[in-house]
Amino acid sequence: MIKLSEWMSWTKEEIRRRGLVSTGFHLPYNPDLKERSRELRKNMTDAEKKIWFGYLKLLQVNVVRQKPIDHFIVDFYIPDYKLIIEIDGKIHNTRERKECDIFKENMLKVYGLSVLRITNDVIIYDFDNAVKLIKDRIGLIG
């Protein structure tokens, strides 16, 4: 596991060796994921649409949809809070997917990011609670 202090000391060559791109201003990402992230933005799931149009798009801070970070694409990224919001469907209930999610979260923690996972069902059937989970994480009141 890479530690945050190690990542911060990576040279441009080390970042390139991992197949990533970074100017030093933004988080390293795999440029091969850019087209896929565009497709995902155009084809959001019902739960992603609901949380995006019903709450995240209205926030007074920058929220990025389908953001490539490292070798992953995250559902939503709020840079001001270093927060990633992942919307999980039923596929995330499998053992294999849970292991992948744990690995992904650990890699994202290397960059000083935190991950909030919300299930599709919570967003679709208990929207107010989904919003509360996000507000609680970023410290918004009301």
Image (cartoon, rainbow, N blue to C red):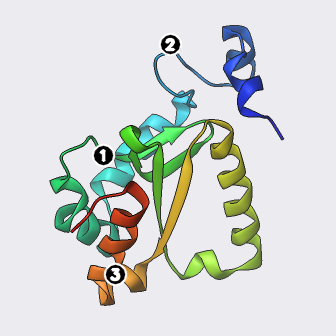
User: Badges 2 and 1: C-beta atoms under 8 Å apart?
Assistant: no
73 versus 99 height, above or below: above
Residue 21 location (% of width, % of height)? 57, 20
Q: Quadrant of residue 70?
A: top right
Q: Residue at x 25, y 58 (%)?
A: 56
Q: Secondary structure at mark 3?
A: helix
Whole-angstrom CA distance, mark 1 to mark 3, is 19 Å
Q: Amino acid at mark 2?
A: Thr
Marked residue nearer the N-terminal end (1 or 3): 1
Instruction: Please tell me whether mark 2 or mark 3 is closer to you in this view.
Output: 3
Q: Which residue is mark 3?
A: 129
**What is the crowding at mark 3: few (fewer than 14 residues within 10 Å), some, or many (at least 20)?**
few
Instruction: Please tell me whether mark 1 or mark 3 is closer to you in this view.
Output: 3
| Quadrant position of the C terminus in the picture | bottom left
**What is the crowding at mark 2: few (fewer than 14 residues within 10 Å), some, or many (at least 20)?**
few
Q: Amino acid at mark 3?
A: Asn
Marked residue nearer the N-terminal end (2 or 3): 2
91 versus 32 height, above or below: below
| Quadrant position of the N terminus in the picture | top right
Query: Which one is nearer the viewer's eye here, 62 or 121?
Result: 62
Q: Which residue is mark 2?
A: 23
53 versus 104 height, above or below: below
Q: Residue at x 28, y 53 (%)?
A: 42
Residue 141 location (% of width, % of height)? 26, 64
Residue 58 location (% of width, % of height)? 15, 55
Query: Which one is nearer the viewer's eye here, 77 or 135?
Result: 135
Q: Secondary structure at mark 1?
A: loop
Q: Which residue is mark 1?
A: 63
